[in-house]
């Protein structure tokens, strides 16, 4: 196991009706004037925003509102949020929604105290040195942004989707009420489940030896997702299954499953170009990319893929031909994704094989290489897109 530093300062508040404690937790974490930031219509329609406004009012906390965050959130609304926070002298941001709303909130939070363009943090020009505190009320188990130090934003003018990270933007508190996720359509539930599993796989496929504890934590999250996702798709109101998935989503991405080991993240990088170009759900893009990446890199780590096949997908180990076990595990993963309603190839995602050269160019890889498990260049990335384009379950 490698040396590591792990900071997870977020206070998690889990369970039924916990959104009514939003005002209390904002006060506890020093907020005196709040930006209430949210997405399209789901939180208003379900009555959640009404309850949150009530909680803030009862706690005597003044607030301004900025709704309209789109999935794959854009920089344009972030600029508006930064101006609003400055003019209203806001000192705390409350995100009510999923990864998109939380990431937009984090971007506003880092932009307010910064004198330059907040995009500098995403383009690599500047490092985050300060940020307003952020709290979240999560409405979809997926991105893990409620416990992560990451934020992903799309620059509308250039069609670039980029991420940045710092412990400074980890939420101060996150309210996790699984009942809030019961209104999710099956497709969004499955997209979220895929993203959760991908966050584990990006950590699971490692070149670091002797990492039994994090291997087993990763496998626990994956097995939970394999069991619970079909249950919530069949029974959307199943609170206990929703609860297991919600906590799995957080555990998958605080990095507690990834400490002390090299990680990869190439599938995410390759996927982000799909959701930037086609505005598809991040999880749906991952459903197409992640198994394709696995097929492509499998020869470089046969025993690790065979371990996944046996421990997660219940395959019988073929000791004479471990690669056949490894490949069976990948196939079972893709079939699982199909069974929960995820796309398996470009056509099902709404992507075009003829766009592959453009997608590769957009990754910005140039003549460089990227990745922790297997290092990839532009030709490798193009090959993975081609596998994804033509995959069948
Ligand atoms: O906008 P509304 O009307 O709320 O609808 C949303 C949205 O259309 C809907 N939704 C959310 N909660 C709901 C609901 N509908 C009914 N009932 C509810 N309870 O779901 C749709 C998707 O929401 P979104 O926030 O986009 O989903 P997700 O949490 O998957 O976030 C995706 C974004 O997170 C980024 C992705 O790239 C993508 O931009 N990621 C962020 C990460 C991070 N910050 O750590 C890591 C991830 O790997 C990921 O890259
Ligand atoms: Zn993700």
Image (tube, rainbow, N blue to C red):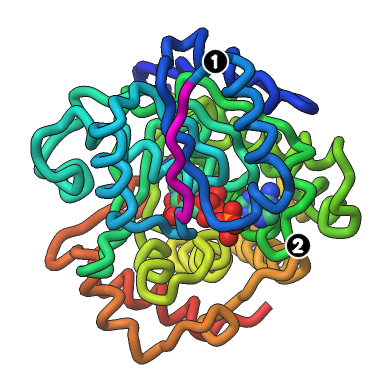
Front in this rendered view, residue 212 or 346: 346
Disc marking residue 369? none
Q: Residue 12's image quarter?
A: top right
Specify whether residue 304 is in view.
no
Vertical position of residue 157 compared to residue 198: above or below: below
Q: Position of residue 220 (x, y in %)?
A: 70, 34
Q: Which residues are magenta?
A: 62-68
Secondary structure type for disc 1: loop
- Of residues 279 and 303, the one drawn nearer to the viewer in this rendering: 279
Residue 210: percent from the left, percent from the top?
49, 26
In the image, residue 111 sits, relative to residue 357, either above or below, namely above
Residue 160 locus on image (x, y percent) = 26, 64
73 sits to left or right of 126:
right
SS class of the residue under badge 2?
helix
Residue occupying the point 75% across, 36% down: 178
Which is closer to the viewer, label 1 or label 2? 1
Q: Is residue 80 visible?
A: yes
Identify the image quadrant of residue 234. Answer: bottom right
- Rendered position, 322 above or below 95: below
Please report the residue visible at 50 percent of the width from the left and 36 percent of the height from the top: 95
Residue at 31% in and 32% down: 109
Position of residue 349 in the picture relative to residue 20 (left or right)? left
Q: CA distance from mark 1 to mark 2?
A: 38 Å
Q: Which residue is mark 2?
A: 186
| Residue designated by label 1 | 60
Percent position (x, y) of residue 163? Answer: 31, 48
């Amino acid at each position: 196991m490698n040396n590591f530093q792990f900071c997870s300062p977020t206070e998690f508040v889990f369970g039924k009706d916990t959104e009514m404690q939003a005002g209390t937790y904002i006060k506890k974490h020093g907020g005196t004037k709040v930006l209430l930031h949210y997405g399209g219509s789901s939180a208003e329609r379900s009555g959640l925003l009404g309850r949150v406004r009530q909680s803030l009012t009862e706690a005597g906390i003044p607030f301004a509102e900025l709704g309209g965050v789109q999935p794959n959130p854009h920089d344009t609304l972030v600029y508006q949020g930064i101006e609003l926070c400055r003019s209203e002298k806001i000192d705390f941001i409350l995100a009510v929604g999923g990864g998109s709303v939380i990431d937009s909130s984090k971007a506003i939070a880092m932009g307010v105290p910064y004198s330059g363009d907040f995009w500098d943090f995403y383009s690599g020009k500047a490092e985050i040195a300060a940020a307003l505190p952020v709290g979240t009320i999560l409405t979809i188990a997926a991105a893990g942004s409620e416990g992560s130090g990451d934020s992903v934003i799309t620059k509308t003018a250039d069609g670039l989707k980029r991420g940045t990270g710092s412990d400074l933007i980890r939420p101060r508190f996150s309210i996790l009420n699984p009942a809030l996720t019961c209104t999710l359509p099956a497709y969004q539930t499955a997209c979220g489940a895929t993203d959760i599993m991908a966050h584990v796989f990006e950590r699971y496929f490692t070149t670091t030896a002797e990492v039994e504890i994090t291997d087993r934590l990763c496998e626990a999250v994956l097995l939970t997702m394999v069991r619970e996702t079909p249950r919530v798709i069949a029974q959307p109101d199943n609170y206990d299954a929703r609860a297991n998935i919600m906590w799995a989503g957080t555990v998958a991405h605080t990095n507690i499953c990834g400490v002390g080991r090299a990680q990869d993240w190439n599938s995410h990088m390759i996927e982000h170009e799909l959701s930037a170009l086609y505005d598809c759900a991040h999880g749906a893009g991952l459903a197409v990319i992640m198994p394709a990446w696995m097929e492509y890199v499998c020869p470089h780590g046969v025993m690790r893929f065979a371990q996944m096949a046996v421990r997660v997908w219940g395959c019988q180990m073929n000791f004479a031909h471990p690669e056949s076990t490894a490949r069976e595990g990948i196939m079972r993963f893709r079939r699982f994704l199909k069974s929960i309603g995820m796309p398996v190839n470009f056509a099902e995602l709404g992507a075009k094989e003829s766009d592959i050269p453009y997608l590769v160019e957009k990754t910005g890889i140039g003549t460089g290489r990227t990745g922790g498990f297997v290092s990839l260049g532009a030709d490798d990335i193009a090959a993975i897109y081609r596998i994804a384009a033509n995959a069948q379950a």
